[in-house]
């Protein structure tokens, strides 16, 4: 098994890979194609067992799949994949995809529903960096994440309105009405800033599942606000007024699991702001749960002015001393007709076919890219890479054309100054 390696500063992302990292990314794509073509994957069984052991005791991981055949490609589509090349099945240790809890039919939708408008390499690189470039461990991790997304029906959070989610999960909309958590602006590194007002949380006010769904909602909405080349977010846990009645250990465990297992490499910095004395007893319980990588991104601030070390004063809400942005959070309810395009199945199917046609083309180019150094007379690697990057941009354009037909509009589409734009960009308005 290859040894774990660290990511040298400034490398490991789209456009900044070292030659070795590029080869490992090719290997991971090759593993994915191996599954898609044959339904089996060359992962040593001990690696799979180690991942199973790591997830033991997790309530989310132990849930049996209830949505295996319920969700696919946002509905049906006429676009079909090219015939897959027959792959050799020579390795002595191969794990059947079913052993992980996925089917071949679920793999490709799980992959591309997760990529959204990002460069496809970006998703795989997150899991490679999280597993220190060990491809076997990265593959096992990403497959476990795909399984979770299917089991927990992550597509539901994207496709249903806030009112529909509130009808199913008691207290979902309350999170937004209270302003318990919201996204506003970016920090000095260009990362979207998520504010969490901990004093507003009382565990009995909502079902535990509603809080989990809301957390995923914020994660998925936040992903739309992360603009390349930025890949991470900034979280501010505002502990002003915190008391033990606000503490929710189950939620903290779920949040930690999300960042470590399901959305790896998406946390840039987590600020714990103005933690009172009573919190430090709680912290002694929480700290051992944290992965060292996540723990290294946590910063404690005592005074409001310290926040301006991370967030420009012009972008920091003026409720914090030193902040100049006259921002006041307000929840705007779901508007009548805002999701009417989701009923236009004819347009949805046409746009879906266009997006999927580009997807198949990207996969074909990726297969060529993987093999180009091994085949005499093959096209130059840099030529193929340029085509892949250009196609990734086309995929992003095609995805955001499709987006309003498959995703319910959210608060950040309907605000006075909409943050989320039709082309996938984010525009923040600051009042100074």
Image (cartoon, rainbow, N blue to C red):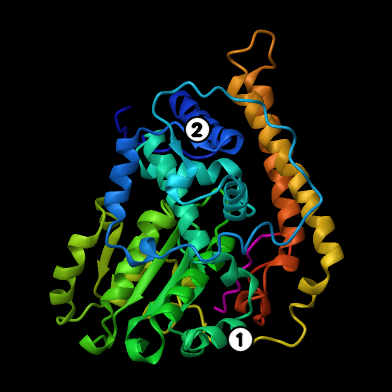
Q: Quadrant of the C terminus?
A: bottom right
Measure how far apart labels 2 and 1 are at the Cα level: 41 Å
Quick check: 135 above or below 380? below
Q: Position of residue 61 (x, y in %)?
A: 37, 60
Which circle marks residue 163 in the picture? 1
User: Residue most toward the right?
Assistant: 346
Q: Position of residue 203 (x, y in %)?
A: 33, 86
Q: Quadrant of the N terminus?
A: top left
Is any part of residue 2 visible from this angle? yes
**Membership of 117 in magenta stretch:** no
Q: Position of residue 377 (x, y in %)?
A: 69, 9
Which circle marks residue 92 in the picture? none
Q: Quadrant of residue 252?
A: bottom left
User: Residue most toward the top?
Assistant: 376
- Secondary structure of the magenta portion, mostly? loop
**Membership of 426 in magenta stretch:** yes
Residue beneath disc 2: 25
Q: Earlier in the sequence, mark 2 or mark 1?
A: 2
- The residue positioned 57% from the left and 63% from the top of the image is 225
Q: Quadrant of residue 88?
A: top right
| Boundaries of the magenta span | 424-432
Residue situated in front as seen by the camera: 391 or 115: 115
């Amino acid at each position: 098994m290859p040894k774990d390696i660290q990511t040298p500063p400034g490398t490991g992302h789209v456009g900044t890979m070292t030659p070795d990292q590029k080869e490992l990314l090719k290997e991971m794509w090759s593993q994915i194609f191996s599954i898609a073509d044959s339904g089996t994957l060359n992962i040593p069984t001990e690696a799979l067992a180690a991942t199973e052991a790591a997830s033991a005791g997790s309530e989310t991981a132990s849930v049996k799949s209830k949505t295996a055949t319920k969700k696919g490609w946002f509905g049906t589509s006429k676009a079909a994949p090219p015939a897959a090349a027959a792959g050799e099945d020579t390795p002595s240790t191969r794990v059947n995809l079913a052993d992980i809890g996925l089917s071949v039919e679920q793999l490709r939708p799980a992959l591309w529903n997760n990529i959204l408008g990002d460069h496809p390499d970006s998703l795989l690189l997150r899991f490679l960096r999280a597993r220190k470039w060990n491809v076997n461990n990265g593959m096992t991790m990403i497959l476990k994440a795909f399984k979770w997304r299917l089991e927990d029906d992550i597509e539901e959070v994207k496709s249903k309105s806030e009112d529909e989610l509130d009808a199913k999960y008691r207290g979902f909309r309350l999170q937004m009405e209270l302003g318990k958590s919201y996204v506003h602006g970016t920090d000095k590194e260009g990362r979207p800033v998520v504010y969490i007002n901990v004093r507003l949380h009382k565990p009995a006010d909502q079902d535990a599942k509603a809080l989990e769904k809301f957390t995923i909602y914020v994660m998925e909405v936040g992903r739309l606000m992360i603009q390349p080349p930025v890949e991470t977010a900034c979280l501010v846990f505002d502990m002003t007024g915190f008391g033990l009645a606000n503490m929710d250990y189950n939620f903290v465990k779920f949040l930690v699991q999300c960042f470590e297992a399901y959305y790896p490499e998406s946390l840039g910095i987590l600020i714990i702001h103005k933690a009172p004395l009573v919190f430090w007893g709680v912290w002694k319980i929480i700290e051992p749960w944290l992965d060292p990588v996540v723990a290294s991104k946590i910063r404690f601030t005592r005074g409001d002015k310290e926040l301006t070390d991370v967030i420009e004063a012009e972008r920091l809400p003026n409720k914090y001393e030193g902040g100049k942005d006259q921002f006041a959070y307000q929840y705007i309810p779901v508007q009548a007709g805002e999701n009417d395009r989701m009923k236009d199945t004819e347009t949805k199917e046409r746009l879906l076919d266009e997006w999927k046609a580009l997807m198949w083309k990207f996969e074909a180019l990726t297969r060529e890219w993987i093999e180009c150094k091994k085949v005499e007379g093959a096209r130059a690697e840099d030529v193929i890479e340029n085509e892949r990057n250009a196609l990734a941009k086309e995929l992003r354009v095609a995805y955001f054309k499709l987006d309003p037909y498959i995703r319910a509009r959210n608060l950040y589409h309907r605000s006075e100054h909409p943050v989320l734009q039709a082309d996938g960009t984010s525009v923040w308005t600051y009042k100074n």
